[in-house]
Amino acid sequence: MRLAFFNATRKWGGVKTWTLEFAAALTRLGHTVIVLGREGAFIERALGLGLDARAVDFGPDYNPIAIARFMHFFRTERIDAALVNVGRDLRTAGIAAKLSGIPLVQRVGLPEDMKNVWKVRALHNWIRPHYLCPCHFNRNGLLAHLPCIDAADTTVIHSAKIPAKTAPAHVGSPLQLATTSQLNRDKGHEELMRVLARLRDEGHAFHWHVAGTGHEEAALHTLADELRLQEHITWHGWTQNVGAILQQADVFALPSLSEGLPNTLLEAMAAGCIPVARNVGGVAEVWPDSLKDFLITPGEHSNESFHASLSSLLTAQADTLLRWKHAAWSQCVQAFSLDTQARKLEAFFTDITGKR
């Protein structure tokens, strides 16, 4: 098959990571995948993965020049299907795919990424893409938020990662924690920071690796100073090598107040990190049964539960921690490896294109 994956968003997010990883996986399976996006980190990382990646100018919404250019691209490159995100790529490349008569797939990041307004409903009723969801939570939320969408036009294929080749065999001293999400209010860094300050005051030793940037970055640095936590934190900022941080981590803390299915969670499990997270979005769909004690019920007492979970990890014996790390890694190996999910995505595209 010959596929085109588009992403016109400016900031980095989980959908971009998913797009590149699955594009690379489908390429390894023998398909041609061309990645198109704005010039910058997205295209640079795609090229670094050995993908055919092209920087393009999407222009404004419904830009006739961009639409005509993408129609020419589909024709000359003999594209069998196109995949777009929710943004300007849908309103240019998505329209071009409709006019070119090729199957269009929209990857759904979060259920409410699209507003339930007449112009959105009109565009989707006309284009009628197939909606690809990374978890059942996203699919159910999408159908509830936009009742105009036909459930038959939706498919769930869980996100995935490449697990470490060998099971985890090391525990840090002190225990190494990691959080690798955007530094925005809904990601819950402030709440986690206050829990960690309390654990420090109780005499627990740890080091927290924080990767990412965002609107709350300056405020979080100020709070870390106020709580006297800076010596316990390494701020990694925006990085293309999150894997290197997770390789040295023992625990992955995900304090998000809302999520779809976070790529960061699967990435941490693939590296053999013990996850501790609020049970939001599709998190429970990939959670190991043996680690349910670390899946926190959201609500007013969730910070207390976070404290209890992290306290039990900080006081556990090394062999117990290794057993928990192995459980997280095994869950990824057995159910959410990229090879397994890429085969499902291959079958999905085979079905909608009729290409065998």
Image: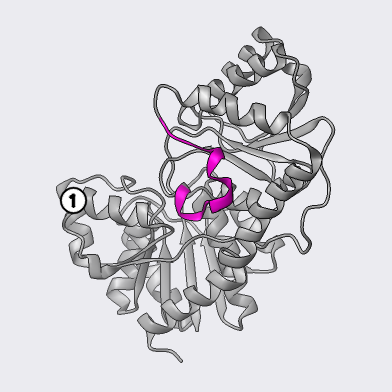
Determine which residue is flagged by label 1.
119
Observer-nearest of 200 and 22: 200
The residue under the point 73% across, 48% down is 241
Q: Residue at x 38, y 48 (%)?
A: 110
Q: Pick whichever, 146 or 71, lies toward us.
A: 146
Q: Residue at the spot x=18%, y=45% of the render?
A: 117
Give residue 21's position: percent from left, percent from top.
Answer: 60, 63
Residue 133 seen in render: yes
Q: Is residue 289 magenta?
A: yes
Asked whether residue 236 appears in the rendered view, the answer is no
Main SS of residues in magenta: helix
Residue 326, image x, y percentages: 71, 54
Against 303, residue 265 (above or below) is below
Q: Nearer the viewer, residue 270 or 224?
A: 270
State left or right for residue 279 relative to residue 155: right
Tell me the magenta residue range.
284-298
Give the camera-side residue of 116 and 122. Answer: 116
Q: Mark 1: give few (<14), some (14-19) or many (20+) Cα within 10 Å.
A: few
Q: What count of labels does the image hold?
A: 1
Which residue in the rendered view is the most extreme toward the bottom? 356
Judge from the rendering whether residue 316 lies leftward or rightward of residue 174; answer left or right: left
- Residue 336 sits in quarter: bottom right
**With 94 as the anchor, is 336 left or right in this view?**
right
Colour scheme employed for the rendering of this structure? one colour
Question: Please, what secondary structure does the residue beneath circle 1 have?
Answer: helix
Relative image position of residue 296 (x, y in whole percent): 49, 35
In the image, what residue type sits under mark 1? Answer: Lys
| Residue 169 higher or lower than 30, as above or below | above
Displayed quadrant of residue 216? top right
Q: Is residue 100 magenta?
A: no
Residue 207 spot, x, y in % from top left: 76, 28
Image vertical order of residue 267 relative to residue 204, above or below: below
